[in-house]
Structure formats: C-alpha cells, structure tokens
Image (spheres, rainbow, N blue to C red):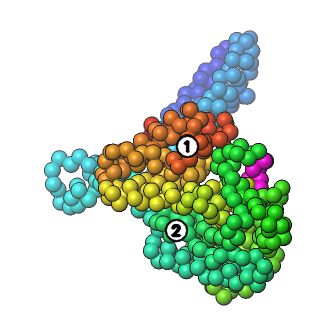
C-alpha cells in the first residue's frame, strides 16, 4: 500500500511538472517563436529527465536502462548545443499585437500602388555589357599601351640632355678615343615604345680609321655565330699596332667588345657625377651596376625610363645595320652583335604606309601583353617583331577592324614556331631566335599561348 501511494504521488508530481512545462512551452511559442520554443523544449525535457533520475529510487528496470537513458540525455544535450541560434526578435508590446509579415518583393508587383511609387526601372540593375574580343583589345590598347604625347616629349627631352652630358664626359675622360656624337633612338623615337620596359637607346658610335679595320662575318670565325661580326685589325705591316687609339682594345688581332664594355661600365658607375647631373636635369639618374649592359635608370616626377648606352660600329659590309658591343658568352664574347632593329622598324613603317595598316599597333599590343605575363615575359621584342613581319608580308586585311583577328593569328604563328623550336630572323634566316630558350621555357611559353588562344581575354 505504501509503495502504491509512493508511485501515485510520483505520478501526481509528474503531472504537475508536465502541466507546468506545457504552460511554459505554450507561452514560449508566442514569445520566442517556433524555433525558440523547440530549443527550450529540448532543454527542459533533458533537465527534467536528469532531475527524475536523481530523485527517484532505482529499481531493476531502471538499473538495466540506466546506460540507455544517460546516452539519450547526452544525445539530447549535444543536439541542443548543435542547434543553431536564431536571431533574437524583439517581442511585441502586447501578446495580442499582430506580427507584421515581410513586405512582398518589389520585383513582381501586380499593379501600380501608392505604397510603391518608385518605377521598376530604378530597382533593376542594368544589364552588363558584352564586349567582343576586338572591342576588349581596343580598350586594352587605350588603357595600357598608348603613351601620352606629353610623356613621350618629356622622355625625349631627358634622353637628349643625358646624351649631351655623357658626350661631354667621354670627351673629357677619354680625349684620345674618337667617339662620334651620341644619338638617341629606339622604339621611343619610332612610335614603338611599349611601356617602361622598353629601353631608350643611346648610340655611341666608334670612329674607326678607314683602311685599318675590316668586318668578318661571325659564321667565318671560331664562334660560328651568324648573329655576330668580328672587327679585325688590318694593315699591320704599314700601320703597326699602336697606330690607332683603338689598338689598346685588341684581343687576338680583333677589336674586343667585351674590353670596351668593361671600361665604360666602370667609368659610368664610378667616375660620372650622376647626382649632380640629375639635379641639373630635375631627375634622379643611377647606373644599373647589376646588369652587364650599360644601363641608366632615370626617375622623374612624372615618369620612369631606362637608357641603354650602346657602343656601335658601322661599315659597308653590314649596310645600314649597326654592330653593337653586347655582353655575349663563350667564343662570341669578343664579337659584335648585328643590330637589326633599325631595318625591322623601317620595314614595318613602310608596310603600314602602303595600306594604312596596323602592324605596328599589333606589335605594341603583343609586347604589352607579354611584358605583363609571367611565362610570356621570356618573349622579347625581337621574337614578336619577327612574327609581325612574317604576318605583315601577307596580303591580308590590316585595317583596325581586323586587329583582333591578326592578334589571334600571331598567337597561332608563335605556337607553331615553338612546336618546331624554330623562329628564323626575317633579315637573317640563318639565325634562329629561339636558340636562347631552354626546352622547359619553350614548353611554358607554348602552354600559356595555347591557353590564351582558347580564351584570349585572359591575356588582356
């Protein structure tokens, strides 16, 4: 009887607790909403089971199911922790106050109403413009290729002033060496400048005595290099060594470009008062000591440029071409590199003048695209010029409307040349311009060009 009364009292307490929980959940649903009431219900039920196990005596059935009940309780508590918290909403001032429903979207109104006076055209975002590749190419040219006339004029003025200062220095430092007048040139003066990466050329010609020097093609020397020429000293029987001021730079009977470059590099780095010259010209001038070339870095308030001082030799054997003192390696270290840039620039200009074409613009676009690409940056102006010259000789449309098509054709021609590992020089077919690239570099460039041909917009 006592056990029955105890169970009856326990059932009565459970009924009272259940009624309290139901009342609490009913009011919580009004205040917290369905999500909040669900979270509160789970928490209350878990706490209730824990209290029941702590206050009630355990019988055999309870002992058997103790492990299961504990596992269920931890599952419920873990469910409570894992339940995402809902954003708290401020309760209404009174329980009877109606809850405002979200306003309908303005994108699909049934008709004009006073509550929505704004026209639908103001709410809709404008459709994006779909540009063709030709249009994107012209935008890229306008924003990244075209250089303002004021910057071109300022760069020319700075280069001319530096040429005058360097000319005076050479005459005072080496009065015995007959240097000619320094002549500025290069892409900047031919309308082919593609950003600050292109060097402004400053030609310093050597005045050689006629009859004492002759030019020998590089293919006939021990270097067997068709790109180069050797400057040989002649008439030693009648004009012995020492008769010419340039004899001090002879190596094995040939005028060494390497010795001359070393002399001028040391002089430009240590003997010239560049800070004073820069202050006079209103800019900062620093020789690039890390480079084997004779480079001057010029920083102005409005622009930056690099001036390349090039020692040159001319002769009847090379026609209108120049021979440059260039840092070459191996057996060609004392030879002179044939400079084909003047002939290439003149040929492009002549072709464009003939049909009012865009070959020069195509070359500028290719140079700008490659300069800003990690893999294509290995392609220099010389590689790209040969491609444009080969395409330019074809009788195809070269108007501005076909510029995008010519750009894609240039990429295809580059890919074909890389597959064959052969890009012959236009004015010297015996020279393969890809010889200076390794197999890995050729593969990287070819892969980048292939991706660019599939989606050319990514190159811009």
Secondary structure type for disc 2: helix
Q: Is residue 290 visible?
A: no
Q: Quadrant of residue 242?
A: bottom right
Nearest to the observer: residue 64 or residue 284: 284
Where does residue 321 sit, x and y in percent of width and height?
Answer: 57, 59
Placement of 217 over or under 35, stated as above or below? below
Residue bearing mark 2: 188
Check the picture and name the quadrant holding the N terminus.
top right
Estimate how packed mark 2 is, as few (under 14), some (14 to 19) or many (20 or more) residues with alpha carbons within 10 Å: many
Residue at image x 67%, y 50%? Answer: 217
Residue found at the very far bottom of the displayed protein: 280
Residue stretch rendered in magenta on the structure: 326-334
Task: Please identify, in this view, whether the residue under mark 2 or under mark 1 is nearer the observer.
Answer: 1
- The reply to whether callout 2 and callout 1 are in contact (CB within 8 Å) is no
Placement of 109 over or under 180, stated as above or below? above
Where does residue 417 sit, x and y in percent of width and height?
Answer: 53, 37
Q: Quadrant of residue 243?
A: bottom right
Estimate how packed mark 1 is, as few (under 14), some (14 to 19) or many (20 or more) residues with alpha carbons within 10 Å: few
Locate residue 457 relative to residue 42 in the image: left or right.
left
Residue 446 disc label: none
Does the magenta portion include 255?
Answer: no
Residue at image x 46%, y 49%? Answer: 389
Which mark is first along the chain, 1 or 2?
2
Secondary structure type for disc 1: loop
Residue at image x 80%, y 68%? Answer: 239
Where does residue 149 sit, x and y in percent of width and height?
Answer: 45, 74
Residue bearing mark 1: 429
Measure how far apart labels 2 and 1 are at the Cα level: 27 Å
Nearest to the observer: residue 156 or residue 454: 156
């Amino acid at each position: 009887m006592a056990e029955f009364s105890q169970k009856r009292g326990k059932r009565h307490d459970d009924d009272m607790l259940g009624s309290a929980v139901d009342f609490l959940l009913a009011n919580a649903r009004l205040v917290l909403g369905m999500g909040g009431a669900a979270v509160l219900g789970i928490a209350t039920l878990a706490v209730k089971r824990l209290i029941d196990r702590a206050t009630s005596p355990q019988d055999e059935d309870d002992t058997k199911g103790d492990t299961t009940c504990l596992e269920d309780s931890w599952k419920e508590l873990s469910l409570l922790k894992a339940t995402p918290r809902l954003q708290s909403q401020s309760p209404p001032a009174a329980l009877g106050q109606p809850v405002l429903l979200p306003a309908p979207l303005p994108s699909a109104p049934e008709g004009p109403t006073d509550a929505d006076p704004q026209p639908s055209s103001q709410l809709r975002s404008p459709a994006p413009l779909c540009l063709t590749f030709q249009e994107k190419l012209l935008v890229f040219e306008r924003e990244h290729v075209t250089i303002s006339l004021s910057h071109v004029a300022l760069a020319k003025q700075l280069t001319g002033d530096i040429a005058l200062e360097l000319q005076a220095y050479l005459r005072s430092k080496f009065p015995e060496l007959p240097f000619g007048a320094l002549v500025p040139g290069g892409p900047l003066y031919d309308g082919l400048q593609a950003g600050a990466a292109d060097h402004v050329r400053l030609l310093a010609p050597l005045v050689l005595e006629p009859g004492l020097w002759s030019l020998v093609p590089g293919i006939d020397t021990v270097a067997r290099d068709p790109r180069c020429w050797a400057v040989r000293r002649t008439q030693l029987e009648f004009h012995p060594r020492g008769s010419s001021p340039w004899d001090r730079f002879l190596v094995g009977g040939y005028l060494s470009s390497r010795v001359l470059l070393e002399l001028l590099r040391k002089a430009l780095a240590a003997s010239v008062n560049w800070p004073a010259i820069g202050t006079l010209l209103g800019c900062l001038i620093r020789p690039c000591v890390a480079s084997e070339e004779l480079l001057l870095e010029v920083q102005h308030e409005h622009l930056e440029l690099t001036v390349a001082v090039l020692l040159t030799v001319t002769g009847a054997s090379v026609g209108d071409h120049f021979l440059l003192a260039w840092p070459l390696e191996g057996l060609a270290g004392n030879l002179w590199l044939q400079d084909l840039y003047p002939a290439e620039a003149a040929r492009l200009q002549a072709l464009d003048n003939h049909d009012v074409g865009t070959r020069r613009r195509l070359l500028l676009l290719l140079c700008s695209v490659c300069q800003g690409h990690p893999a294509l940056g290995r392609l220099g102006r010389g590689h790209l010029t040969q491609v444009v010259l080969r395409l330019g000789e074809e009788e195809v449309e070269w108007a501005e409307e076909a510029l995008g098509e010519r750009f894609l054709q240039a990429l295809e021609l580059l890919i074909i040349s890389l597959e064959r590992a052969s890009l012959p020089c236009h004015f010297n077919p015996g020279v393969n311009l890809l010889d200076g690239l390794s197999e890995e570099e050729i593969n990287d460039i070819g892969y980048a060009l292939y991706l660019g041909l599939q989606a050319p917009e990514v190159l811009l």
